[in-house]
Image (cartoon, helix red, strand yellow):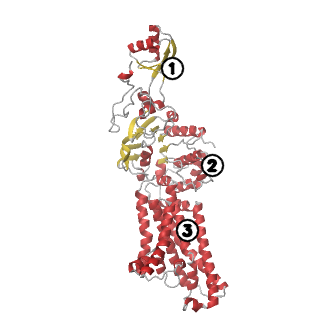
């Protein structure tokens, strides 16, 4: 288990981590999400003792990492794709780590085999591709067969086979009762890997709940409908209690009722439908909605900007949800706000 | 490249395994000798020490053969004086190169980010710094002593080849070899401390070079020109001059041949200052500063 309690870290005048509290329970994969600069890596580095918190504590299995008699057996971490010396061979780098705890050389061979690096173990790590470097970092993290894994962007640069392997590895480790904290910007991957999510933005915890709860609470679940007379259908849907917005190509975006209700309203009002679908939100949709106001570094001018995000030409269909944390878990919790629609959005 | 689907089949991690200092020492030794730069710099250092000893002894031997011993030395020669002087001809450069290898070993960990895996395995940090200090210190001292003895032997061979009948002087050579070992040790720990403070290989190597080479020579030049006592005092209290003061007769590092007049206690204090103060400052930075 990892316990983060009221962690704050400032760099000069910038608060990178601001009174962050959350718990990563054993037996689960906890996804750690947030925009660039949100404070994910800083939090992970504080867990690993690489940076000191200004206030607050980070403990692993009940105590700070430095107090563990065998840190490699307690926590394995991948915090940087190039965290092993490029001038040393992969095998020598792992032997160095193994030496500190008196681990046998065959354990080094095991993790090399596990990560598929046996054939290139004699090469210097500096000659590795990004993906091979990631595999080596994962091998180092697994060396002590630890109870807790902290992985920062472990699938960056991995080929599809490697991505699948990391996913399976994390699932297997969690199934074995271990604690896994993993950060990634690949939402589709996280959706398949994580049981729980901790979302952080501008150094503050924005959400801390299960994957399903997160999508249900934050995601924009709605119905898309196209009809021969959309105006008349819209009026009847509003009468039935739905919130209706114009959608693309003359369609309507309907919130507050499900597709069955929309179909019944259309039948009762005698409007022919040409399209009807329930749009289920993805993790990516939910994540973008939650963090739309928390992004520090924006890309410019290519493709869509998330509605409601600074720089977006479109008004937000719904306000970004407020903090979604377990009441009492962090000391900064607020009530959960389910899919609310603003009065302005109702037509 | 394919990976196994199971997490850890046949795991061979003894659950009783613990982080221990002997393991950290072993790890630091493995770190030091498994990078190419260590071998390149160390072998270059050894080559320069031995080549300078042999080459300068041939030149000295030829000069003495031509003009006579008394003309060259201005008096009687103590046993081992020629061989030991020649043995230290390339010492400053050689020690600097070994110090650079030590700088690379610690500053390179920070620049390559491999310090992350080091501190993940040893989060208390200080055991790895202490292990680095011991491993590099012992290696530096032993390399200095052995290098001096071999260089003195080569110098004796060189002098003999020019027809000079000179003595090695066992006692003098032993003393000079120990002082050479001390000199390499001082520069090793100076490099380790500055490497930990700066976390930058180039910056630390240049700083060591300035302390070893430049400052001494600049201060000596200024002291000679300006006749200021405090400048003379400063010129004596740089690493090379202080170690040379411990050599007694016939052993100054030729590259910076200084005529020092330090008391032995003063020389030891100065040597301790240059070896231990940067090392201690580096330890504080190593222990306390965040890793980026």
How far apart marks 1 and 2 lie (CA) works out to: 55 Å
**Which chain does the residue under circle 2 lie in?**
A
- Residue that badge 3 annotates: B97
Is there one chain holding both mark 1 and mark 2? yes
Secondary structure beneath dot 3 equals helix
Disc 2 secondary structure class: helix
Q: Is residue A226 visible?
A: yes
**Eye-nearest disc, 2 or 3:** 3
Residue B156 visible? The answer is no
The one nearer the camera, B174 or A15, is A15
**B149 to A55, vertically: above or below:** below
Which element is circle 1 on? helix
The residue carrying mark 2 is A118
State yes or no: discs 2 and 3 in contact (Cβ < 8 Å). Answer: no
Front residue of B251/B29: it is: B251
Subunit of label 1: A
Question: Can you identify the residue that label 1 sits on?
Answer: A249
Mark sitting on residue B74:
none
Q: Which residue occupies the foreground of this view, A246 or B54?
A: A246
**Distance from label 3 to label 1 (Cα)?**
73 Å
Q: Do marks 2 and 3 share a chain?
A: no
Q: Are marks 3 and 1 on the same chain?
A: no
- Which quarter of the figure is the C terminus of chain A placed in? top left
How many numbered circles does the render carry?
Answer: 3
Mark 3 or 1: the one toward you: 1
Q: Is residue B102 above or below residue A295?
A: below
Q: Residues within 10 Å of mark 1 (few under 14, many from 20)?
A: few
Percent coordinates x, y for residue B185 in the rendering: 50, 71
Q: Position of residue B15 (x, y in %)?
A: 49, 50
């Amino acid at each position: 288990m990892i316990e983060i309690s009221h962690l704050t870290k400032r760099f000069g005048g910038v608060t990178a981590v601001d009174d962050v509290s959350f718990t990563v329970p054993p037996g689960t994969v906890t996804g750690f999400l947030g925009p660039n600069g949100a404070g994910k890596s800083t939090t992970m580095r504080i867990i690993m003792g690489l940076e000191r918190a200004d206030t607050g504590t980070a403990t692993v299995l009940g105590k700070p990492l430095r107090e563990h008699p065998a840190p490699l057996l307690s926590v394995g971490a991948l915090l940087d794709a190039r965290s092993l010396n490029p001038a040393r061979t992969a095998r020598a780098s792992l032997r160095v780590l193994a030496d500190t705890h008196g681990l046998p050389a065959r354990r080094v061979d095991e993790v090399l085999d596990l990560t598929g690096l046996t054939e290139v173990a004699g090469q210097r790590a500096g000659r590795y591709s990004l993906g091979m470097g990631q595999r080596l970092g994962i091998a180092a993290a697994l060396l002590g067969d630890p109870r807790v894994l902290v992985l920062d962007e472990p699938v960056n640069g991995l080929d599809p086979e490697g991505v699948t392997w990391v996913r399976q590895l994390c699932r297997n480790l969690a199934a074995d009762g271990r604690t896994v904290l993993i950060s990634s910007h690949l939402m589709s991957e996280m959706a398949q890997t994580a049981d729980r999510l901790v979302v952080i933005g501008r150094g503050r915890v924005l959400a801390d709940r299960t994957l399903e709860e997160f999508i249900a609470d934050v995601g924009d679940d709605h119905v898309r409908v196209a009809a021969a007379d959309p105006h008349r259908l819209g009026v009847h849907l509003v009468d039935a209690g739905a919130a209706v917005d114009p959608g693309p190509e003359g369609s309507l975006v309907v919130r507050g009722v499900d597709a069955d209700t929309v179909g019944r309203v259309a039948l009762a009002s005698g409007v022919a439908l040409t399209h009807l679908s329930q749009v289920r939100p993805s993790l990516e949709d939910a994540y973008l909605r939650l963090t739309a106001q928390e992004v520090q570094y924006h890309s410019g001018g290519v493709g869509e900007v998330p509605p409601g995000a600074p720089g977006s030409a479109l008004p937000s269909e719904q306000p970004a949800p407020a903090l979604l944390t377990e009441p009492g878990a962090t000391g900064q919790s607020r009530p959960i706000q389910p899919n609310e629609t603003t009065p302005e959005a109702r037509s | 490249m394919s990976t196994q689907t199971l997490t850890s089949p046949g795991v061979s991690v003894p659950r009783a395994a613990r982080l221990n200092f002997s393991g950290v020492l072993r790890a630091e030794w493995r770190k030091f000798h498994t990078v190419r730069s260590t071998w390149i710099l160390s072998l270059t250092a050894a080559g320069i020490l031995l080549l300078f000893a042999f080459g300068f002894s041939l030149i000295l031997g030829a000069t003495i053969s031509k003009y006579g011993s008394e003309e060259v030395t201005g008096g009687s020669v103590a046993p081992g004086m020629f061989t030991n002087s020649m043995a230290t001809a390339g010492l400053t450069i050689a020690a600097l190169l070994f110090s650079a290898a030590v700088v690379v070993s610690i500053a390179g960990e920070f620049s390559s980010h491999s310090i992350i895996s080091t501190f993940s395995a040893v989060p208390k940090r200080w055991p790895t710094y202490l292990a680095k200090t011991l491993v590099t210190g012992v290696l530096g001292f032993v390399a200095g002593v052995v290098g001096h003895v071999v260089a003195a032997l080569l110098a004796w061979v060189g002098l003999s080849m020019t027809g000079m009948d000179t003595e090695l002087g066992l006692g003098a050579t032993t003393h000079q070899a120990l002082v050479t070992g001390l000199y390499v040790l001082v520069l090793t720990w100076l490099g380790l401390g500055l490497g930990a403070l700066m976390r930058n290989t180039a910056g630390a190597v240049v700083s060591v070079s300035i302390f070893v080479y430049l400052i001494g020579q600049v201060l000596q030049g200024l002291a000679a020109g300006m006749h200021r006592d405090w400048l003379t005092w400063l010129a004596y209290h740089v690493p090379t001059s202080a170690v040379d003061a411990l050599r007694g007769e016939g052993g100054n590092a030729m590259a910076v041949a200084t005529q020092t007049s330090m008391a032995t206690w003063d020389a030891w204090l100065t040597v301790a200052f240059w070896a231990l103060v940067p090392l201690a400052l580096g330890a504080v930075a190593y222990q306390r500063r965040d890793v980026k």
